[in-house]
Image (tube, rainbow, N blue to C red):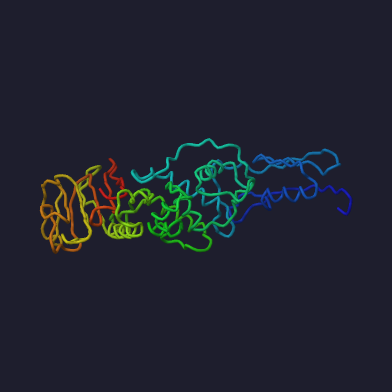
Amino acid sequence: MNGQLVEYEIPTMVANDPTSDGNSTTYMPIWYVQQLLNNVGITTDTWNGTTWTIGTASGASTKTSTTSTSTPSTTSTKTPTNGMATKLDAVIAFYQSMHTVAPTTGIYSNEYEKLTPPKDPYTDVPQADWSMVYDALYHGYITADSATLFGSNDPATANTMDEQYMWSMGIPKNSPLQLSWNPGDGNAVQWANFYDLNTGVPTSGDLTVSQLNQLEQNFVTSQKGWYETSNGVYHFAFAPYNTYTLSEGSTWSASHSLSELKQSLVYASTITFKKIGGSGNQPDLLWTAPGFSIHSSFLLGISGGSHLTASTNGGKSYQSFDSVIGHQYASTNPQNGATTDPSNPIYVKTQGVAGVNLDPMPVGAGYGSAIEFTDAGVPEVQQQSAGM
């Protein structure tokens, strides 16, 4: 200082962070402390995630001091300021959402293989979180700010989360054709809105931790394929996929195909089922679904084996079916319950495994799912991209 070497014994470089339930932290991020010390000639500082070893200024004695922080957690500790979520939080939340449930069969295009990450090159990524960050970088779901800074403390937005989900579908970023066949044409927020993934969160501005958690839960629900309301009624949730597959053999344009798919999802969102008896993996189910006339431009089919019965008169009476297309309700076949003026809704009763398809006519670009139950009576939904 003023040309003189000054030595000052700092009692501590950590303090309790009031925004993170009292976790110990440095007064400012280690990287910034290092830059400050480098600028005053202390260039031999090293940080291994637990211990910080600092050399003295150039030309002075080689005295070395060591300052240790608390032992880092083996799991991520989110410590945003003022309750706001960060880019690192978003990466962790997305990774966890995709590993909470098994990816919905027939939809997910990328395998979540176990990766062995190299040495962490980023000074702002904790070692405990590096494997999750590396997973996102390796698959191209997100990018780093620079070669040495990931941008962990950058604000998280809906776009930060939505882009990770969209790119995880295997949609090539450099393919205008495939992007045009997907909702939003490369705009991640519009893509996510198509599947109702942003429900309950703002799509502009920075996210709070609570809003980020809501997005994470939305993603988990979409992969699970269903959610249950407080009255014991189950609803479908929709797992996205690369809708470029709709172009194969289609005579429709991309915009028309996506419009028909969206309408299929809107109709499918009104289909519910609930348990009315049975147990375990063979529950008796009551389905409530939109009633389509035999002349409708949309087809509804519900299959469920020989136990299936359906009512198109508001539940006044039920009938069973055994036609060439099997034991199922089909809104286009009179032998399977189709009428010119069905009630709205219609009701279908099944037992155990069931299948649903809802497609525009001619069949294609619709929604399809197969439902079965675990021995504990928990639904498992497998979705298909273009109907059954």
Depth check: give the residue in front, 168 or 131. Answer: 168
> In the drawing, does residue 111 fall left or right of residue 209?
left
> In the drawing, does residue 372 fall left or right of residue 347?
right
> In the drawing, does residue 374 fall left or right of residue 199?
left
Question: Residue 244, percent across and down?
Answer: 37, 50
Residue at the farthest top position: 116
Question: Residue 329, percent across and down?
Answer: 16, 52
Number of dots carrying numbers: 0
Residue found 61% across the figure and 50% down from its top: 23
Question: Residue 53, percent across and down?
Answer: 73, 40
Judge whether 340 appears above or below 384 on screen.
Answer: below
Depth check: give the residue in front, 174 or 14. Answer: 174
Hey, which quadrant is residue 80 in on the image?
bottom right
Judge whether 157 appears above or below 386 on screen.
Answer: below
> In the drawing, does residue 354 fall left or right of residue 197?
left
Residue at the farthest right position: 3
Depth check: give the residue in front, 295 or 206. Answer: 295
Question: Residue 323, percent across and down?
Answer: 11, 47
